[in-house]
Amino acid sequence: MMHYIVQPIKKSANLRIDIATTLSKLPLAYFFQKHNLSDISQTVMKDVEAIEHAMSHAMAKIIGFILFFPIMSILMLVGNIYLGLSIMIPVVLSYSLILVSKKNSIKKTI
């Protein structure tokens, strides 16, 4: 469990180092002529923070749902078949619709 907490922090630290290395290779004229240095650093920090938040919180929620949903579905089906089906069918259909709409939106953008 501790691995899922520490790993995103390490990855975001490595990402910040990689971005700093990439930015250090750019010519100084890039920073002083067209872009404000504080705007660039603020944008990079916000983006990396958003990625870190997604890796640390969203992944935990997804893993929790993947484990929780099948177990609870089985328990509901055992307890009451109608209750289990009334929960499982909408969740499975909505997930399927999300996947289909995502595929369609990717096709339209290409």
Image (cartoon, helix red, strand yellow):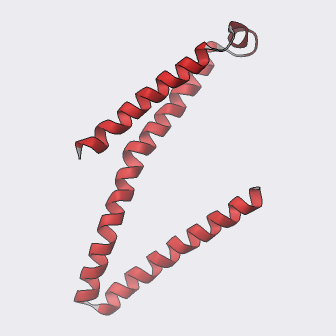
Query: Residue drawn 33% across and 71% down?
Result: 69
Where is residue 81? Give x, y as percent.
31, 92
Q: Residue 6: which quarter of the image?
A: top left
Direction from residue 41 to residue 76 in the image, left or right: left
Q: Residue at x 54, y 24 (%)?
A: 19
> Residue 44 location in percent, x, y?
56, 26
Relative to 49, residue 106 above or below? below
Looking at the picture, tell me which residue is in the foreground, 59 or 37: 59
Quadrant location of residue 43? top right
Q: What residue appears at the point 51 percent right and 26 percent down from the top-left corner?
A: 45
x, y (%) of residue 37?
62, 13
Q: Is residue 71 left or right of residue 106?
A: left
- Decide which of 44, 11 is in the foreground and name it: 11
Question: Would you place residue 93 above or below residue 28 in this image?
Answer: below
Q: Is residue 22 above or below residue 76?
A: above
Task: Specify whether 73 is left or right of 104.
Answer: left
Q: Position of residue 72 (x, y in %)?
A: 28, 75
Q: Quadrant of the C terminus?
A: bottom right
Kindly identify the residue that appears in the image at 24 percent across and 88 percent down. Answer: 78
54 versus 79 height, above or below:
above
Q: Nearer the viewer, residue 87 or 31?
A: 31
- 53 or 66: nearer the eye? 66
Count of number-bearing discs: 0
